[in-house]
Image (spheres, rainbow, N blue to C red):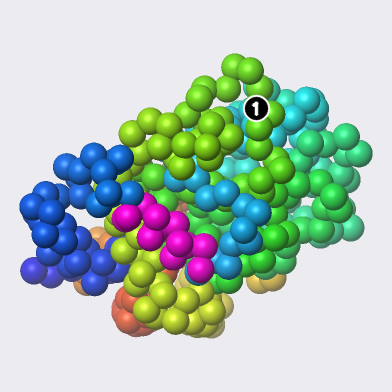
Amino acid sequence: MSRVYNFSAGPAMLPETVMRRAAEEMLDWHGTGMSVMEMSHRGKAYVSIAEKAEADLRELLQIPSNYHVLFLQGGATGQFAAVPMNLLRGGQRADYVYTGSWSKKAIAEAKKYADVHVAASGEPDLMHVPAPSEWQLSDDAAYVHYTPNETISGVEFHWIPEVGDKPLVADMSSTLLSRPIDVSRYGLIYAGAQKNIGPAGVTLVIVRDDLIGEALPQTPNVWDYKQQADADSMLNTPATYPLYVAGLVFEWLKGLGGLEAMAEINERKARKLYDAIDASAFYSNPVDPQCRSWMNVPFVLADSSLDATFLEEAEAAGLTTLKGHRSVGGMRASIYNAMPEEGVDRLVEFMADFEKRYG
Ligand code: PMP
């Protein structure tokens, strides 16, 4: 068996130890004689898996007790709609911060339900995050939404916006669990799983108690946070297997020393890659150095006619899925928690060698 270093933006690498454990437990989970995939979600065995996953996540993120943790489906894209449906709470207006492709999608979806006001924007370059002094928040906004890490452009907030008494809502799909965060600063956090959490199929929502219970009447039951909270995220059949694997990922993170330890590793991995890019005239990254993502590192070659050769040779060296998003081209190395530091080292070596031969 030979595993590659997979730099995919998501679904992305999972820790090898997690997958070995899932493989060991595949046919017979803890003497039950069945796979987690075959279990009733209401049975004792599965309920214990779901409860442990939630408890471990709460511990990792230090989630205060006045927050609900929901494990839903429909991805972060589903949450683009669920957030306004649940959080307008009789209001009309919602403030959104525009910093790239994913916030753009969140804004477009929210417009179906809310009077969206773009309170701050990273335009024209979308290579930086707008400074706090530029934000124009509405007095009557029901909440303020932003995207702490734009997965495609690799633009990340390294600070938490101050929005007064408005609930701050964050699409943390590509940054959650990369470092400790102060959950109490947020009204709601959501994330699709397939980057740092686990396999695709489960969507995490962390929401403050007082914000739920006033969903728009047309809200689908499965996306009504109050209904899901009351049903322990089991209003309907949940994504049982993805949540089980996510639970194994949470255990793995705890074993490594939690999110502080992860942050140290992630910062170092990102620094190695950006340092290599900045030290070379052959590679470049266009993002404002203050706002560079720890998780998604896009870069371009000085001569784009070499892109295909770069990708081919990288693939042959066991470094895969480095092609940038189709909307921006170039390369992108996604280096989530499960990407070993050695993978980044190998990429840096490969890049230097490629530059020597073609630069
Ligand atoms: N938001 C961000 C920041 C993302 O990176 C993604 C997926 N790449 C999405 C939303 C959409 O997520 P999903 O495919 O889970 O709906």
Direction from residue 110 to residue 20 in the image, left or right? left
Residue assigned mark 1? 215
On whether ligand 1 comes within 8 Å of the CB at mark 1, the answer is no
Residue placed farthest to the top in the image? 218
**Is residue 206 found inside the magenta-colored segment of the image?**
no
Q: Which residues are magenta?
A: 48-59
* Overall secondary structure of the magenta section: helix
Relative to 277, is 89 above or below?
above
Report crowding for label 1: few under 14, some 14 to 19, many 20 or more residues within 10 A (C-alpha): many
- In the image, 124 versus 98, the foreground residue is 98
Relative to 238, is 313 above or below?
below
**Is residue 56 found inside the magenta-colored segment of the image?**
yes
Q: Position of residue 172 (x, y in %)?
A: 56, 54
Q: Which residue is pictured at 50% across the width and 25% down the height?
A: 221
Q: Amino acid at mark 1?
A: Ala
Q: Is residue 334 visible?
A: no
Q: Which residue is pictured at 69% across the width and 35% down the height?
A: 87
Direction from residue 354 to residue 278 in the image, left or right? right
Q: Position of residue 178 (x, y in %)?
A: 51, 68
Q: Quadrant of the C terminus?
A: bottom left
- In the image, 179 versus 335, the foreground residue is 179
